[in-house]
Image (cartoon, rainbow, N blue to C red):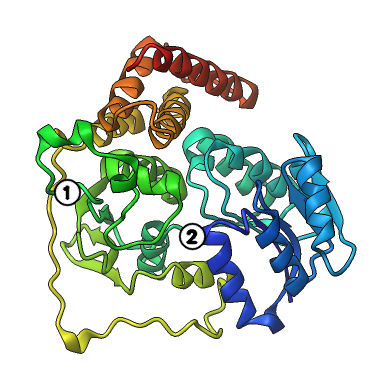
Amino acid sequence: MKKIAILGSTGSIGVTSCDVIRVNKDYFQVVLLTANTNYELLAKQANEFRPAYLYISSKELSQKLTTQLQYAPKIFYGDTGLLDAVCECGANILLNALVGSMGLLPTLKAIELSMDIALANKETLVLGGDIVTSLAKSKGVKILPVDSEHNAIFQCLQGNQQRPLKRIILTASGGPFLRTPLKELASVTPEQALKHPTWGMGKKISIDSATMVNKGLEIIEAKWLFDIPSTMIDVLIHPQSIVHGMVEFADGSLLSMLGPTSMSIPIAHALFYPNSEYNSLGQTLDMSKGLNLEFISPDEERFPLLAIAKHVAQELGTKPAVFNAVNEVAVKSFIDGKIRFTDIHSVVEKVLSLHTNSKKYDLKTLLEVDSWARNKAEELLRGTK
């Protein structure tokens, strides 16, 4: 039985992970669940799975959480509480479903403790890919991709590691504005941007899908996950979201992974790896209805952040940390109605132009760069109307 910690259990990935575990109770013991502010859902999950440890962001919320619990777990909170909870929980696999760069430090702590990582937090590898993968290798820890695209590539490569690889292809839905006239993009609303055409996701990743910055982040993540140059990673828009990833070998053959738009499949694959016998949630793709599989090269005028991300992925160094940090700040500002949709790209581009890239860095440097980029983005946004 695997002892599992779920970071971000009240988000969309965390909730689906709980669904997977619910139908596979004999395989898992949940030892830690965490949330940022949603204490009511965290309490509901805790009362069902009875982990010994919980985390929520503040003391006030921990007191509210306590009133809804039917048992007495140890509750962590505050700035250091999440790392303390990871240290104490005794998990042997950690599912990181946190949003943004806050996922990096808990991942590193879990790796230090020899926990395998089921990774849904792409920012962990965008921000600290070299540090994370080097530490995982030294500890003999598996990093198992949960993102549907990376999990698809992971599955396609299984048993094919000795075949000469030409490239991997990440697919993208194109988001809600794939065919919106370019002149209208400056006036789109957060509500429009959050209406993803094929996936149900959290707010931040939904906006990242609308700008296609998520695909840029995934290029950087894939570079570290599969240890290949970013020039061997391509992106194709696939509006139907049926083909989740493709691998092309040097002989011209292509392998692809098809499936329904359900995160339960990559989550279960990662949690059970290398085993494949488990109870599924029953989502299937009915091929008998006929499938229209459309693939389009991304228009970088429509999606300028994707073009910037490709450049960042080739440069690496501290640039990915800046790219990620500024995007997080700008996306939040857009969701809050403070800037226009097109300002996200402008702010990212501006802060990157102010940054001097460094190819030599350590964790302390990355965190300092992350903080600098956020402060610079905030400063620029205060002057954006």
Q: Secondary structure at mark 2?
A: loop
* Residue 358 shows in this picture: no
Seen in the image, is 98 located left or right of residue 211?
Answer: right
Circle 1 packing at 10 Å, graded few (<14), some (14-19), many (20+), is some
Q: Is residue 359 above or below residue 160?
A: above
Closer to the camera in the image, 232 or 256: 256
- Which quadrant of the structure image shows residue 45? bottom right
Indicate left or right for 339 with 121 as reference: left
Q: Where is 344 relative to 28, above or below? A: above
Quarter residue 274 falls in: bottom right
The residue sitting at 51% across, 54% down in the picture is 120
The residue positioned 18% from the left and 62% from the top of the image is 251
Check residue 343 in the rendering and tell me which mark sits there, or answer none: none
Q: Nearer the viewer, residue 307 or 205?
A: 205
Report whether 75 appears left or right of 24. right
* Residue 263: image location, x then y, percent: 44, 67
The residue that disc 1 covers is: 178
Q: Residue furthest bottom?
A: 288
- Residue at position x 70%, y 54% from top? 39
The earlier-in-sequence mark between 2 and 1 is 2
Whole-percent x and y of residue 124? 54, 41
Label for residue 146? Answer: 2
Total of numbered circles in the picture? 2
Task: Give residue 290's position: percent from left, percent from top.
Answer: 14, 82
Q: Please state which of the two labelled residues, at mark 2 or mark 1, is closer to the viewer.
A: 1
Quadrant, the N terminus = bottom right
Q: Amino acid at mark 1?
A: Leu
For marks 2 and 1, give the CA distance: 25 Å
* Residue nearest the viewer, comparing 279 with 345: 345
Q: For the residue marked with disc 2, what is the amino acid?
A: Val
